[in-house]
Amino acid sequence: MKIPILDLKTQYAILKTEINEAIARVLESGAFIMGPDVQLFEQEVATYLGVKHAIGVNSGTDALVIGLRALGISEGDEVITTPFSFVATAESISNVGAKPIFADIEPDTFNIDAKKIETKITSNTKAIMPVHLYGQPAAMAKILEIAVKHNLKVIEDCAQAFGAKYYGPSLNTCNSKSFSSFYGKAVGTIGNVGAYSFFPSKNLGAYGDGGLVVTNDDVVAEQARMLRVHGALKKYQNEVLGYNSRLDTIQAAILRTKLKYVDKWNQARHQIAQAYNQELEGIPGVITPQVTRGNVFNQYTIRVLDGQRDALKKTLAQQGIDSMIYYSTPQDQLPIYQGQHSKCEISHQYASEVLSLPIWPELTPKVVKKISAEIKLFKQASFCYT
């Protein structure tokens, strides 16, 4: 039996009638660009996230670029971020003329290590961009404390974390009790700006590209709305150089349909991660991820030690089990940045160890057991061989 890394067909089969009705509604309306479903989705998703403004855009990458520009980040500025993420994170910083500065990750969460951020701050630093990688919220309490101390903006990269909520653990490390006010809040609503992706593989995925900028700041929201439509708030009255970055109406209609189910799906992902952890517990050389409150597991990612990651990936493939490596090269060592930054050692190590296993809300316990059994067999065989 073939086990993909992600099965989108099963979800569509369940929602087929609702999805088809939503698409037909848009087709029959003829309002394909910035139609009513875009505004309705923005209202509904803002309510869901508990944020004042939600601005639909063309992609998660555009959400980061527009979010940075709306915050005033530009040429000569520095933005501190993690090396362990998809290139869109650093690329967005570079594309607004700023410079990405990389702080290494925490060993346990794969996210930026807040304790290392302050060592990277210079007179040019204007913002921090944490990434809630794999659906695990970053240490936002400590990050916000640093940002306030140094008068920095915070833009959250939530591309893999729609629906994730922040519950710590870093609240106890903060000096100010005021940071407890965002305990339990949705990621993306804690900093100045949140940026989401609706790429089909995300927890809330469209059937094409899509993204979202969220903020509680009226001025930032106005800037983001202007930037997404060629820098104009009024048609043909372009005030700044902007982009053609509108959320497609059909995608908005699909997202409206799926938004109703995202909490249920995220809960299922959390339960699947717990099942994986139970099945893989105690296997030598396999480190399972933390299953913490608020983590929505866009990916379920293990670490495979002793240089065996690639061999395990190959063995799983031979058994018809897909897996993925997110990410084989940290951003700071990609060709476009290579030689400009010293290696972040933990990220560099983990790039050779991480392996993401199949996960989607409808994944059955039987399949989890099969995948886990193949990993056990691989480790047993490699142990006997050595």
Image (cartoon, rainbow, N blue to C red):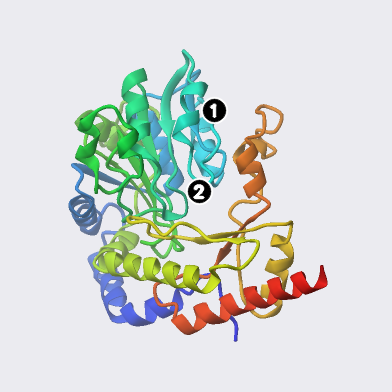
Task: Say if 133 sits above or below 316 in the image.
Answer: above
Kindly identify the amino acid type of the residue bearing the numbered disc 1: Ile
Image quadrant containing the C terminus:
bottom right
Query: What residue sits 28% from the left and 27% below the top?
Result: 175
Mark 2 burial class by Cα count in 10 Å: few <14, some 14-19, many 20+: few
Screen quadrant of the N terminus: bottom right
Q: Is residue 9 above or below residue 288?
A: below
Identify residue for label 1. Answer: 101
**Type of residue at label 2?**
Asp
User: At which x and y percent is residue 318?
Assistant: 71, 78
Comparing 127 with 352, the one in front is 352
Quarter of image, res 321: bottom right
Q: Residue 37 location in percent, x, y?
A: 23, 59
Task: State the SS at label 2.
Answer: loop
Q: Residue at x 57, y 39 (%)?
A: 83
Q: Nearer the viewer, residue 340 or 288?
A: 288
* Badge 1 density bin: few <14, some 14–19, many ≥20, Cα 10 Å: many
Quick check: can you spot residue 236?
no
Give the number of the disc on residue 108: 2
